[in-house]
Image (tube, helix red, strand yellow):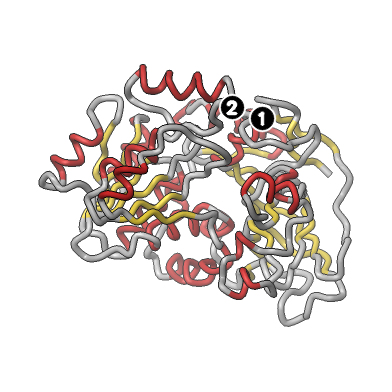
Amino acid sequence: MRANTWAGRNKVEVRDVPDPRILNKRDAIVRITSTAICGSDLHLVDGYVPTMQDGDIMGHEFMGEVIEVGSGVPGDKLRVGDRVVVPFPIACGACAACAAELYSCCENSNPNAGIAEKMFGHPTAGIFGYSHLTGGFAGGQAQYARVPFADVGPLKIESDLSDEQVLFLSDILPTGYMGAEMCDIQPSDVVAVWGAGPVGQFAMDSARVLGAAKVIAIDKQPYRLRMAEEAGHIPVNFDEVDVRSRLLELTGGRGPDKCIDAVGLEADHGSAHVAAYDRIKQAVRSETDRPHALRQAIMSCRSGGVVSVIGVYGGLLDKFPAGAWMNRSLTLRTGQCHVQRYMKPLLQRIERGEIDPTRIITHTLPLDEAARGFEMFKNKQDDCEKVVLKP
């Protein structure tokens, strides 16, 4: 089969690779009909997530048709011919974390738990196409994929919704929604979202759906801010204004009630000297993550507010404003998304027309053009917001 593979830092390559096969009785094989490039994939390509190996199959946002199921998958859960969306965290469904619906913290799905434990203190769940730190599982930017614990993860799509309407249930729509849900949004709340990429856009839409009075989009790309404004959100360009000052203006001097970091470890900054400080520290590996967005969210949030972090962080960061966090009674909430928890409720919201996932798709390419898709997405070429790949 054809698959998009990691070929070294700043390089991906579509290659011929062996077809996947059933390895465990709870596996299924999915013929992929749509997959996507995620901002998190850029952390792998840029070399900030360790343990990638040449030939690793990329991608953790995918859906398709079940073509084979293992003997341990009950027929009422999954059958050949079912159309499914596959969540990016691999979860066993039986451990203490899964019982608490903390699926991205599954205790049984990462065969390389020892590596993750050294990195994070405790292991995380396995993740498709996301390094050997998270299990070394082949990803979904391919023609076919093996899906472990297939009786737990995949969501059957039994309506005539298009792939584009449901594909993002695999990751970025639940991630954005979880970011907003962790804010405990009240009807009077002003919610500020750092990052107007795909996850940030969905966090904004989710904040609106959950009842926020006002949603503010913070980014520097005009096309991303325009997309957010067209969806009813207030744009703030951090290259043109001081973000904290502008947020104070928009909130009567109090700051946003809730702040969402949808950027993560490769954040940029409007001030050249601040941006250079973290770029240099990251380059010499005295820190692994650039926490501009996180710092700014903490310093901007009103006292007693919530800072929700759904941008990916992988290691260590510098100048974390612990004093502001502690002294102003801020609540910090975060986590890789527990996708399985949100898939059905969000599918219902899509069916009711409350959220339109298709609004962020700007490019659709054949799988063989994955490298071009990565180049456009990474470098913000051609107003690229989200790339869907068709195997």
Any mark on residue 375, and which?
Answer: 2
Between 200 and 226, the one lying in front of the other is: 200
The picture quadrant where one finds residue 151 is bottom right
Any mark on residue 371, and which?
Answer: 1
- Residue 255, compared with residue 146, is above or below; it is above
- Residue 33, compared with residue 188, is above or below; it is above
- Percent across and percent down for residue 129 are 70, 46
Task: Assign a secondary structure to mark 1.
Answer: helix
Between 61 and 326, the one lying in front of the other is: 326
Label 2 amino acid? Glu
Residue, far left:
252
Any mark on residue 96, and which?
Answer: none
* Quadrant of image for the C terminus: top right
* Quadrant of image for the N terminus: top right
User: Looking at the image, do the residues carrying marks 2 and 1 touch, with CB atoms under 8 Å apart?
Assistant: yes
Task: Give the left or right position of residue 219, taking residue 380 as reference.
Answer: left
Q: Visible in this render: residue 169?
A: yes
